[in-house]
Amino acid sequence: MPTLSFEGETNGEILIKVRRWLASVEGTEQGNISAVQAVSQGAELTKEALRIIATSAPEPIAQSDVVKGLTNMGYKVTDAAKDAVVAGLDTIEESTGGGVVHQATKAAGKVVYQMNATVARQILRSIKS
């Protein structure tokens, strides 16, 4: 059975790796997915994680109505959150002509770069100590 795994110390690190992988599978360059695509892919990833968690429990627990109900509720909440975020992004894009979403995307890239530089400095300090 094929498997796929991502390693990281934070949720953000794992999401970056997942986005890179998804972009490579879809044949798009990294960073060229839209905000709506990122939200949709994140929602699908969350639902897959819920499925994996539910099925990894011992069989009597995994087959219980409580676990099935909680997993199903998790799917519905994830879909509802995705739909709300996508609708909000669509509204913002329509009212601003896409300017705000484009500015936010640029700002996010700068923040990640700055965060990576800060982390790199901390690592260098810890190595020197």
Image (cartoon, helix red, strand yellow):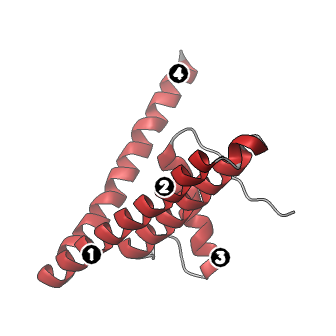
Secondary structure of the residue carrying numbered label 3: helix
Judged by depth in the image, the label closer to the viewer, 1 or 4, is 1
Judged by depth in the image, the label closer to the viewer, 2 or 4, is 2
Q: Which residue is mark 2?
A: 74
In primary-sequence order, the first of circles 2 and 4 is 2
Residue type for callout 3: Val
Q: Are marks 2 and 3 in contact (CB under 8 Å)?
A: no
Residue type for callout 2: Gly
Q: Which residue is mark 4?
A: 126
In primary-sequence order, the first of circles 4 and 3 is 3
Secondary structure of the residue carrying numbered label 1: helix
Residue 36, position as x, y percentages in the image: 38, 74
Above or below, 32 relative to 49: below
**Any part of residue 3 in sight:** yes
Residue type for callout 1: Ala
In primary-sequence order, the first of circles 1 and 2 is 2
- Distance of mark 1 from mark 2, alpha carbons? 20 Å
Judged by depth in the image, the label closer to the viewer, 3 or 1, is 1
- Which numbered tag is attached to residue 106? none
